[in-house]
Image (spheres, rainbow, N blue to C red):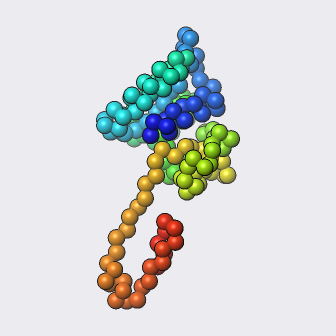
Amino acid sequence: MKHFIISLLVILVLCTACTKNKSKTVIQFASWGSKSEIEILKPIISDFEKENPDLKIDFMHIPQNYFQKIHLLIASNLSPDVIFINNLYLPVYANYLEDLTPYINRSDFYTQTLQALSYDNKILAIPRDASNLVVFYNKTLFDKYGINLIRIGLLTIY
């Protein structure tokens, strides 16, 4: 997670125009999450600022209605410099996200996670994590009716 946040912030510095505040460049970073998730992010942001003394992270925690608020901020031309986003909302905001393709070493990530965060052949977000959905089935019942399951990579087809 720490590597992800640091990579994301460094890429953002390279990709977007950030506002100047005295001698530091301010990067506004928006995220959702529970109190415990935010407590994980705070020391990572602090470490990043210590390693990059010319940068200041303005953290915007949006605990509820995250995407609605991001949508309003974008529509108001007040969008944060860095946002957490998921693959479901990526197409909605694709026109407002920076193409990160030139900055990504594809071998650092699972292909499927990069595909999920790409739109129009452009990588628009960096994977923070990968989750899988698990489906349980009644093997006895499937066997009884002759339904065979074939495992292909991470996908099971019946």
Please state if 80 lies on the left or on the right of 146 as rendered.
right
Q: Nearer the viewer, residue 27 or 52?
A: 52
Q: Position of residue 38 (x, y in %)?
A: 36, 34
Residue at point 52% right, 46% down?
Answer: 127
Residue at point 40% right, 38% down?
Answer: 32
Seen in the picture, residue 146 relative to 11 is either above or below; the reply is: below
Q: Position of residue 71 (x, y in %)?
A: 51, 39
Q: Nearer the viewer, residue 73 or 117?
A: 117
Seen in the picture, residue 42 relative to 87 is either above or below; the reply is: above
Q: Position of residue 22 (x, y in %)?
A: 55, 10
Q: Specify the quadrant of the image occupied by residue 124.
A: top right
Residue 57 visible here: no
Query: Farthest top residue?
Result: 22
Residue at point 52% right, 17% down?
Answer: 53
Query: Farthest bottom residue?
Result: 145
Q: Nearer the viewer, residue 72 or 26?
A: 26
Please state if 19 lies on the left or on the right of 44 as rendered.
right
Q: Position of residue 72 (x, y in %)?
A: 50, 35
Please state if 118 lies on the left or on the right of 146 as rendered.
right
Residue 45 visible here: yes
Quadrant of the drawing holding the N terminus: top left
Residue at point 44% right, 25% down?
Answer: 47
> Total label count?
0
